[in-house]
Amino acid sequence: MTSLFPGMSLVYISVVSDTRTVSPWKIMPSDPGKESIRAFYERRFPDFSEYSLAKAFLGRSKDSLDQIDLEVEVQQAVSTFGPFLKCIVIAGESGNVAYCSRSVSEVLMAAQRNLCRPRLP
């Protein structure tokens, strides 16, 4: 891949959520250095703070992408696997963690009540 600046690669990046395309495909330079895919996403898309990065896919074309770990260095990954980076995001900074409004003891007590109820015909 040819670049205007030595040591810098161009990355074709798209950001999508489960419901819509957050950012269509665009070309962005990747700074030389040991920057992870997660750090690259956070630096390039600071306005997307309502989303958290869940997965990333990388490949030689938009149609042929493989999942890649978010802590892999961008420069190394792009030079090995290709310049197309698709970031999958989810709404909320908490990721896909579900929160329960009841306490643990309430949940356990409800489960115990269900187990101890006699079953009548």
Image (cartoon, rainbow, N blue to C red):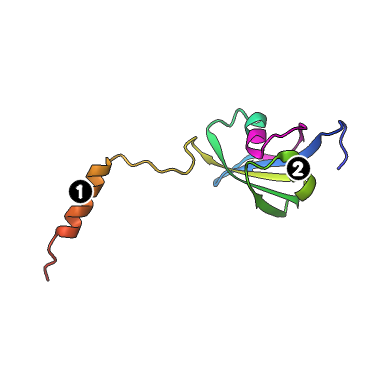
Instruction: Residue type at mark 2: give it.
Output: Gln
Residue under pointer 2: 76
Q: Is 117 positioned to the left or the right of 28 in the image?
A: left
Magenta stretch: residue 25 in it? yes
Q: Is 82 positioned to the left or the right of 56 in the image?
A: right
Question: 63 above or below 85?
Answer: below
**Residue 42 visible in rendering:** yes
Q: Please identify the quadrant where the N terminus is shown.
A: top right
User: Regarding mark 1 in the picture, which secondary structure is present there?
Assistant: helix
How many neighbours does mark 1 have within 10 angstroms: few (below 14), some (14-19), or many (20 or more)? few
Which of discs 2 and 1 lies nearer the camera? The answer is: 2
Q: Give the range drawn in magenta.
A: 24-41
Q: Please identify the quadrant where the C terminus is shown.
A: bottom left
**Residue 61 visible in rendering:** no
Give the spatial CA distance, label 2 vs label 1.
52 Å
Residue under pointer 1: 109
Q: Which residue is drawn at 87% across and 32% down?
A: 6
Q: Residue at x 86, y 36 (%)?
A: 3
